[in-house]
Image (cartoon, grey):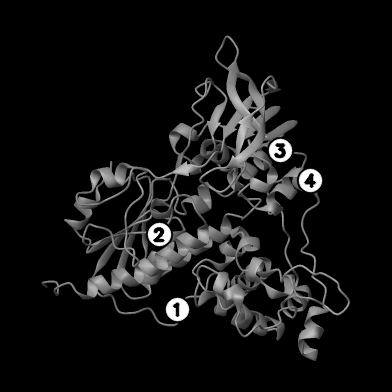
Amino acid sequence: MTHEVARRLAISVQPVPKQDAEARKKNFDETYIGFDLNAARIEASRCIQCPSAPCQEACPVSNDIPGAFALLELGDIAGAANKFRETSNLPEMCGRLCPQEKLCEGACVVGFAIRKDGRKEPPVTIGKLEAFCTDYQRQSLGGYPMPRYLPEPTGRNVAVVGSGPAGLAVAEQLADMGHGVTVYEFWPEPGGVLVYGIPNFKMRKNIVDEYIAHLEAMGVKFVCNTYVGKDVTIDSMLGGEFDAVFVGTGAGVGNQMEIQGENLKGVYSATEFLVRGNLAPEQLPDMYREALPSLENVVVIGGGDTSMDCVRTAIRLGAKNVSCVYRRTEAEMLGRGEERKNAREEGVNFEMLTLPTRIIGDESGKVVSVECQRMELGEPDESGRRRPIPVKGSEFLIPADAVAIAIGYGADPLVPQTTSGLRSDRKALIEVDRTMRTSRPGVFAGGDNVNGADLVVTALADGRVAAQAIADYIATLPPKRR
């Protein structure tokens, strides 16, 4: 170990300031306040600049993390931000939303290095530094950095279906090449899951709003309140003004428990619960514009990040008793550990090894409780996690005036069903090759409607690959007649 590496490993992790739990329970502001400049530079200096950069290898978009931190350490914040922007369209968002502990930070050598004094230190806090750099740059510029020169229009037009991470990445990449881009979105405002699936306490909405404004300044058009496959079809797009179409509709269809009582009043899909609890009525379709009623006892079923979003939203809506019900142990939970920690700090009760068997209502059809059964873990199932087995005679009730079901999402089958020649599997996931080309010429796809419910950063990575493939495809088309 060189003296310089030893010096860096001796630097202790810088704590990331966040709101006190009692204070943040009463607001929807971001939980994490974030680094100041001095702490950010110290934290960046903990990076030992590994030549092999395992953190970069673990990043789905291959961010040059050591390169960014070398610049940040020197105080070149804009340079560090631009280093992230070389490979990522959404570094502000990925810095907040990625499960870094399973990706870049999970691969960081600093986290498992052997120090002379035997002390252990966490990995470099990569995600929070990524957010710090890019936030700082935006604030100094008054918005996202624009290209120095906008290219001459090519005369080619691409339709992007869905304005989530994959669609927005495609839109920016193609607009930067001079192609005309029109983005179609089901919801009343653009942003997809970044607006309608992420609560403000994880990421404030103005970050997305500023990015949409940035894309509009680059010439991207947004058409909202449009359900592609119903209001307009991909066949009609390709038969009209568009030379290619990208499908980035995500996985927005909530899975069902298929137990008695799911149709009772007060039982919500995770999406409905989150949008009605986190957004203003004018941002929502008519069916969701009524505010949620006053809540006292809320049960959220599921163990991923969406369930944490639901329980933490319920706390902020004033519910006195909020329970997360999950059929396995915390070790099998797929979501982020820091989100569970934040939820516990805010007073959420976790009912592990617990399976809901029935949702019970009163004579008016309103939910009043959830019947559950205790579980124990058996042999691993096809996912590699130990299979939960019911414990006989362990049934009990949890009072509930609201239940949110957050047990995963599937893809909407409408686009594959209404697009000729577009192949998909039985789960409505669209089949693509490694460049995101589908079976229908001129149609490309990426993100959760290809992979199943996954991460913001994996959708972003797909979008960047698809954008280049679309550009390559457009280059093969015969010249347009004038």
At a point 52% along the width and 53% down the height, the residue shown is 194
At a point 49% along the width and 27% down the height, the residue shown is 258
In the image, residue 135 above or below residue 451: below
User: Given the image, on which type of amino acid does mark 4 rest?
Assistant: Glu
- Label 3 SS: helix
Given contact means CB atoms under 8 Å apart, are the residues at marks 2 and 1 in contact?
Answer: no
- The disc placed on residue 315 is 3
- Label 4 SS: helix
| Disc 2 to disc 1, C-alpha distance | 19 Å
- The disc placed on residue 147 is 1
- Label 2 SS: helix
Q: Is residue 212 visible?
A: no
User: Given the image, on which type of amino acid does mark 1 rest?
Assistant: Pro
| Disc 2 to disc 3, C-alpha distance | 32 Å
Name the N-terminal-most of marks 2 and 3.
2
Name the N-terminal-most of marks 2 and 1.
1
Please state the horizontal and vertical placement of residue 216, each as a whole percent of the image: 41, 64
Q: Which residue is label 2 attached to?
A: 167
Q: Which quadrant would residue 428 be assigned to in this image?
A: top left
User: Given the image, on which type of amino acid does mark 2 rest?
Assistant: Gly
Q: Which quadrant would residue 153 be assigned to in this image?
A: bottom left
- Label 1 SS: loop
Q: Which residue is label 4 attached to?
A: 345
Given contact means CB atoms under 8 Å apart, are the residues at marks 1 and 3 in contact?
Answer: no
In the image, residue 455 above or below residue 318: below
| Disc 4 to disc 2, C-alpha distance | 35 Å
Please state the horizontal and vertical placement of residue 459, each as a whole percent of the image: 46, 60
Name the N-terminal-most of marks 1 and 3.
1
